[in-house]
Image: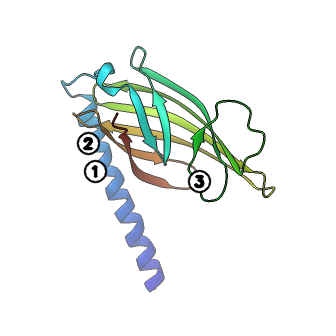
Amino acid sequence: MDKENAEEKNVLIEAEKERKFRVRHSNAFISNNKINGKAFNGIWIIDSLEVPIILKDNCFNVDEEFIMADKKSKWIKVKSDPFEYYKIKALSIDGSLENLSGQYEIECYEESNSDSLSESYEAKGYMIIKNNFKEIEIMEKSREKLKFKKWTKKEN
C-alpha cells in the first residue's frame, strides 16, 4: 500500500507542476510583450549543446550535428565530416513563438563508434521566454515522460 501511495503522490506532484507551467505558458501567450528577434537571436545552451537560433517571422528551425572527440571532451559543432569521433549527435528543432510563449518539436539522435548502441529522442516542447530574452523555461513531453528544464542564452 505504501508503494501505491508513493506512486500516487508522485503522479499528483507531476500533474501540479504541469498545471502551474501551463498557466504561466498561457499568460506568456496572451502577454502584451512581443518577441524581440534581435534580443532573442543568438547561441542558446540546450542540454549542454551550443545551438544557434535565429527567428524568421517568429519561427525557427535548427538542424545541427555535434561531435564528442573522446569521453572527456565537450560536444562541438561539426564543421566537416568527422574522420574519427567518439560520439555524434544530430539535433533538429522546429518551433514558433507568440508573444513570450512558444512551442517546438525536437528530434535528437546520438550514436557512438565505441559500441553499437544508438539513442533517439523525440518530444514536443513548450516555452516561456523571460522578459530579458536570456532564459527560457521549458516543459518537454515525450512518450516516456515529462521534463522541466531551462535554455540559457550564451553571453558574448
Q: CA distance from mark 3 to mark 2?
A: 37 Å
Asked if the residues shown at circle 3 and circle 1 are in contact, with their CB atoms under 8 angstroms apart, the answer is no
Query: Residue 17 at x, y = what percent?
Result: 33, 56
What kind of residue is marked 1?
Lys
From the image, tell me which residue sits under label 2.
Answer: 24
Measure the alpha-carbon separation of dots 1 and 2.
6 Å
Residue 76 coordinates in the image, percent (x, y): 58, 41
Q: Is mark 1 in CB contact (under 8 Å) with mark 2?
A: yes
Label annotation for residue 73: 3
Secondary element under disc 3, as helix, strand or loop, is loop
Q: Quadrant of residue 83?
A: top right
Kindly report the distance in space between the C-alpha atoms of the residues bearing marks 3 and 1.
Answer: 37 Å
**Residue 69 x, y percent position in the rendering:** 67, 49
Quarter of the image for residue 151 reads top left
**Element on which disc 2 rests:** helix
Residue at the bottom extreme?
1
Nearer the observer, disc 3 or disc 1? 3
Q: Amino acid at mark 2?
A: Arg
